[in-house]
Image (cartoon, grey):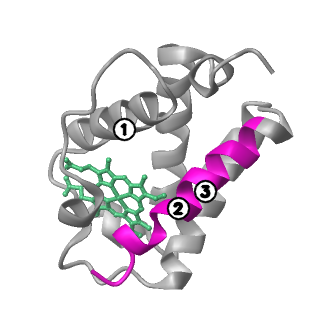
């Protein structure tokens, strides 16, 4: 496997399309939709998500947002909500026909972040 995760995610354009669909899925997901309906600046939130995944996947642009603990402190996000968000991400990856290896790599990143994000 010679390509970086960033390349396999189809770089900035692929990540942009993916984040748009992940956010749409969150807003349609009864388990977590109110969390996202309450975001004041949705465009900024999507930009931060694009930056976060791009930088985390090895892309050239930096992430300029809050760290994951700071971003989610005070939300008390549950295991069920975390799994619901994970389902939305993997569902959107299926829609965009990413391969199993790429989905596994993204899932591993999401799993590694859970203790920084849940129940803060
Ligand atoms: C898959 C793991 C997750 C990642 C990688 C992630 C990533 C991020 C990022 C990058 C931000 C922006 C930080 C900033 O404003 O500087 C953010 C904010 C936020 N996240 Fe998460 N998040 C995750 C899981 C969740 C879950 C499970 C929920 C709720 C169900 C959630 C709800 C929110 C909300 C409501 C904001 C605040 C947006 C705002 O008010 O501007 N996140 N997240």
Mark 3 = which residue?
88
Q: Quadrant of the N terminus?
A: top right
Q: Which residues are magenta?
A: 102-120
Answer few, some or many: residues within 10 Å of disc 2's Cα (few below 14, many 20 plus, some between 14 and 19): few
Residue 90, given in percent of the width and then of the height, sits at 68, 51
**Mark 1 or 3, which is nearer the eye?**
1
Does label 1 point to a residue whose CB lies under 8 Å from ligand 1? yes
**Is tag 2's residue or tag 3's residue first in the polypeptide sequence?**
3
**Above or below, 85 relative to 105:** below
Mark 2 = which residue?
112
Answer few, some or many: residues within 10 Å of disc 3's Cα (few below 14, many 20 plus, some between 14 and 19): many
Residue at horizontal 56 percent and vertical 33 percent from the top: 18
Q: Quadrant of the C terminus?
A: bottom left
Residue at horizontal 39 percent and vertical 77 percent from the top: 118
**Above or below, 104 relative to 60:** below
Mark 1 = which residue?
52
């Amino acid at each position: 496997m010679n390509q970086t995760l960033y390349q396999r995610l189809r770089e900035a354009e692929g990540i942009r399309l993916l984040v748009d669909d992940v956010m749409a899925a969150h807003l349609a997901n009864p388990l977590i939709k109110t969390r996202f309906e309450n975001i004041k600046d949705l465009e900024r939130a999507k930009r931060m998500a694009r930056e976060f995944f791009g930088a985390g996947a090895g892309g050239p642009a930096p992430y300029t947002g809050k760290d994951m603990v700071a971003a989610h402190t005070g939300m008390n996000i549950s295991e069920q909500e975390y799994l619901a968000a994970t389902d939305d991400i993997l569902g959107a990856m299926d829609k965009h026909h990413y391969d199993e290896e790429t989905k596994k790599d993204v899932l591993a990143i999401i799993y590694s972040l859970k203790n920084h994000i849940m129940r803060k």
